[in-house]
Image (cartoon, rainbow, N blue to C red):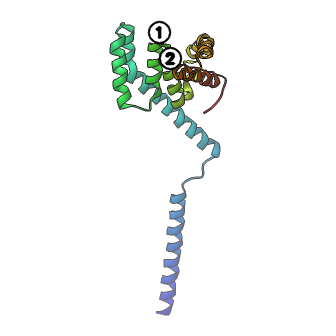
Amino acid sequence: MAGRDRFDILIAGGMLVCVLTLGVLLAGGQERDPSTAALDKALEQQIAYQARIDFLHNLYQPVEDLRLAGQVSAALLKLDELARHYPQEAHGQILQAEILLERGVTRESIDHYVRALRLNGDYVDKASPLSRRSEIEQLVEAQLPVFAARVRKNPQDPALQKSLTGLYYLQSRLAGGCE
């Protein structure tokens, strides 16, 4: 009976080693090449970014349609509605800035561009499909001298000072500055 006990212990020990080894292999998974893991992560990020861009285009398409149809007031109302649902979304700020600038409401347009860039710097990134770099550059080039002169004439006006500070912020972001 003693031989049988040793044999049972040996078999049980061997099975335990096999189970533990199998558990380690299953828990650890296959070792992956680090470059493959980095490629997978980069691909996932690119897919997520593209999905976000598609989402933004679909979400704000009604605003663009109203804008193209000349229904600017309705487009602004739709933007307000979307801003309530997506308060941290920069795209609505960009669209509102563009509409206000077209309407000649420059101060508020500057404020919206600043808010947008503080939320998402992609709008000044040349490589981004969301880029509004050229529009922002034109705004800064055209309005910086105007607002600087206005502030020199009336240095106590906080609204003018805020707009000038916003233009300097936009200029800094265009030059590659960060938050």
Depth check, front residue: 144 or 81: 144
Q: Element at badge 1?
A: loop
User: Position of 13 compared to 58: left or right?
Assistant: right
Q: Secondary structure at mark 2?
A: helix
Which residue bears the numbered disc 1?
104
Q: Position of residue 57 (x, y in %)?
A: 42, 22
Q: Quadrant of residue 179?
A: top right
Looking at the rendered structure, the kind of residue marked 1 is Gly
Percent coordinates x, y for residue 151 in the rendering: 60, 17
27 vs 104, nearest the viewer: 104
Q: How busy is the neighbourhood of tag 1: few (under 14 within 10 Å), some, or many (20 plus)?
A: few
Q: Is residue 121 above or below residue 144?
A: below
Q: Is residue 68 visible?
A: yes
**Is residue 178 placed above or below 67 in the rendered structure?**
below
Q: Is residue 76 left or right of residue 167?
A: left
Q: Nearer the viewer, residue 95 or 107?
A: 107
**x then y, percent, for residue 144:** 61, 15
Please name the residue that numbered disc 2 is placed on: 107
